[in-house]
Image (cartoon, rainbow, N blue to C red):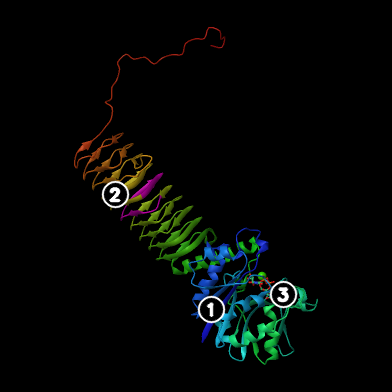
Amino acid sequence: MNLNVIILAAGAGTRMRSALPKVLHAVGAKPMLEHVVDTARQLDARCIQVVYGHGGGAVQSALAHLDVTWVEQDRQLGTGHAVAQALPHVAAHDTVLVLYGDVPLISVDTLQRVIAAAQDDSLGLLTVALGDPRGYGRILRDMQGNVVRIVEEKDATAEQRQVCEINTGILAASGEKLQKWLTALDNNNAQGEYYLTDIIAMAVRDGVKVVPVAPASVAETLGINNRVQLAEAERYYQRMQVEQLMLQGVTLRDPARCDVRGEVGAGTDIIIDVNVILEGKVSLGSGVRIGANTVIRNTTIGDHVEILENCVIENAVIGQHSRIGPFARIRPDTHLADHVHIGNFVEIKKTGVGQGSKINHLSYVGDATVGRNVNIGAGTITCNYDGANKYQTVIGDNVFVGSDSQLVAPVTIGDGATIGAGSTITRDAPPGELTLSRAPQQSKAGWKRPVKKKDPGSSKG
Ligand code: UD1
Ligand code: CA
């Protein structure tokens, strides 16, 4: 079977009240249209076409990385007209699947069943019964229960509006038949549009059976027209993401308070506290614990790492058994080896930290290499920037940096060196020695603290 997928995305999306085209609004940080394309990609389609409209330049440039065929519909004359724009790329023997850029959560499983229902003499139509069918096209059946046509709400009689079974819009049919039916469409209806839905009655007339297919879950067919529905879709999507994590062996203290905005790989026996956001590509080793209010973006975290509360970690690699936070910020290109401790109010950027090293309090370490078993005291700063350029700080193995030191880069601290507290280090410190730069301490015997002079004019004194 040759599958040809047509995704409709040309509608204006007025109800979003947005300068951004509707299909670019995101669910789980991914544009809705990209969700649909990614799902279509899993169906082994010969061709995926996206029908875009006026504001389409923005859609195309935002999603230029998607390998799809872009088809322009320059005037929005209806869903049937939209599908017709894609016909030049449809072969007679193709099975055509029609999807919607604003129905982002549709599943591969449901679509496979719609496709399977479309044969030479049958058409697959995704329908669902809703408690509140308002706004949708209604499915009309005959006395035997066969689907005979779809009536749009605006064209429906009061009696037809009582029908709860609605058209999700998603259907699959033979390319040859679709070609024939679409050419025969007219726009004699309440909206003056070429309705794709009118092909159902044509199919029945041609002896093609309409096979209704039900979705795996109703939420999959949620169409997004406004930001209230966008938020509903987001919640449903997040629920699916965290369920996946839980089934893989992750304990979530509250599944409603962990958001996944990307792809998360996870080992087992992971515990995640509330208000955690995982973004981009995140990999969590087994036994990892993540404290409350933490954001982790594009990061690989080794087994048994403990991340305490309120950390922000981005584009980093964290070795096994390390401990981060609370209140730590790990910035891009940081690579922590195993058993590293990064404590509170510590910022690390573009730095490799060797095994067993500790940077526990109030420090900034950037553009640096830190060896193994190093102890960096509270308040240490690598002065990496002279206002124009950035420079490297190299710290060897077994170094001890006393508190409140400044390491003015470029500078190298040799293996086993000790830096005295409060030093400003501007030249390389030799290995194994104590280096310090500090004004000598002095005490002045008999010195008196000044006292405030009396103001003769003031009675208060
Ligand atoms: C459509 C169906 C309706 C169904 C509902 C499900 C028709 C006539 N009606 O109605 O039976 O219950 O979807 O959500 O098909 N689009 C274009 N070009 C156009 C018009 C629309 O690309 O000229 C795209 C839109 O971007 C959207 C989709 O087609 O992705 C549906 O269009 P919309 O106008 O929202 O149709 P509905 O009135 O919701
Ligand atoms: Ca719609």
Mark 2 residue type: Thr
Mark 2–mark 1 Cα distance, whole angstroms, equals: 49 Å
Asked whether the residues under the numbered discs 2 and 1 touch, taking CB atoms below 8 Å apart as contact, a structural biologist would say: no
Read off the residue under disc 3: 193
Label at residue 369: 2
Q: Quadrant of ligand 1?
A: bottom right
Mark 3–mark 1 Cα distance, whole angstroms, equals: 32 Å
- At x 41% / y 14%, what residue is drawn? 450
Q: Which secondary structure is most common in the magenta stretch?
A: strand
Mark 3 residue type: Glu
| x and y, in percent, of residue 79 in the image | 66, 75
Residue 107 vs 270, above or below: the answer is below
Of residues 348 and 81, the one drawn nearer to the viewer in this rendering: 81
Mark 1 residue type: Asp
The residue range painted magenta reads 330-349
Label at residue 109: 1
